[in-house]
Image: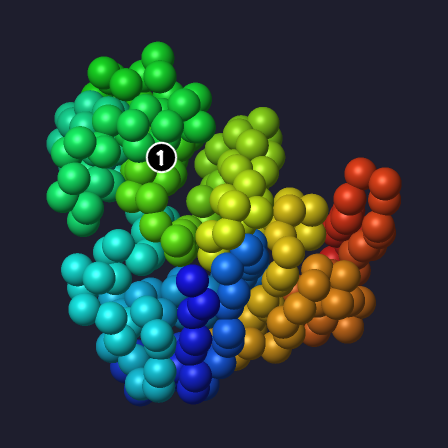
Amino acid sequence: MRIEISDLTVKRGGRLTLDHASLSLEPGELIGLIGPNGAGKTTLMRAMLGLIPASGLSSLAALPPAKRALIAAWLPQEREAAWPISVENLIRLGRIPHRRPDADAAHIEAALSRMGLQSLRHRAVTELSGGERARTLIARALAQDTPVLMADEPIAGLDPAYQIATMQLFRDLADEGRTVIASLHDLGLAARHCTRLVLMDQGRIVADGKPVDVLTPDNLAHTFGIEGHFAQTKEGPVFQPLRVLS
């Protein structure tokens, strides 16, 4: 599904936290939102989904809530578990918008399998490690089976193997025709797996395009204050941060 936002703006306490953001996001894209802490990545996604007050246009926020839940799955940063629900039943919550019990089991099993959680299905989420809980919440979003997946720092707290596996999963979902948007701090994984990067700083979109066109020396210096090296290899794009600029 194509997503359109135009002049999306958020103000909090008189401060501009999202400054007239405009984007067109297409099916089949894995879009990495990158930028320093406080750049506006989370605010952008929440405003796109209509979760916070904003001015401007978002084609997702314009949908009725019931319709929006069938179109976009949202994976927030927060991963705290408030009650000892089982892994399987937490994933089952992703099926609520569909109201199709006949189809639930297959989607739940597929989500458990994709995130390697079959052996934990009966475990209470309150007993899981942070990484296991993160994988469970990703599985819940997968079970929702929407054409759009939006994830806020989905690989934070995962060990390297699951970070890579999750990014590959997101790329597979994009290759299947979904629109996947994820905020990321690991520029190496973003460069490796994303088809497109959107660089933000101080609430503004400052660059948008292919990783090679976004992770330029000027953008790295002005936005992150670092020097890095981007290369195309036979295994795919590679990015390595090198040093902090004084």
How many numbered badges does the structure rendering display? Answer: 1
Q: Residue at x 55, y 76 (%)?
A: 205
Outermost residue on the front side: it is 102
Front-most of 115 and 15?
115
Residue 14 placed where, x, y %? 31, 87
- Residue 205 visible in the snapshot: yes
User: On the rendered image, what quadrant is the C terminus found in?
Assistant: bottom right
Above or below residue 30? Residue 104 is above
Could one spot residue 152 in this view of the protein? no
Q: Quadrant of residue 84?
A: top left
Q: Position of residue 105 (x, y in %)?
A: 24, 27
Q: Quadrant of residue 66?
A: bottom left
Which residue is nearer to you in this view: 76 or 1? 1
Q: Residue at x 30, y 32 (%)?
A: 107
Q: Is residue 87 above or below residue 103?
A: above
Q: Quadrant of residue 54?
A: bottom left
Q: Residue at x 44, y 28 (%)?
A: 114
- Quarter the N terminus occupies: bottom left
Q: Secondary structure at mark 1?
A: helix
Q: Residues within 10 Å of mark 1 (few under 14, many from 20)?
A: many
Circle 1 residue: 139
Q: Residue at x 80, y 67 (%)?
A: 217
Q: Amino acid at mark 1?
A: Ala
Q: Nearer the viewer, residue 242 or 101?
A: 101
Residue 55 lies, in percent from the top left, at 31, 85
- Left or right relative to 126: residue 148: right
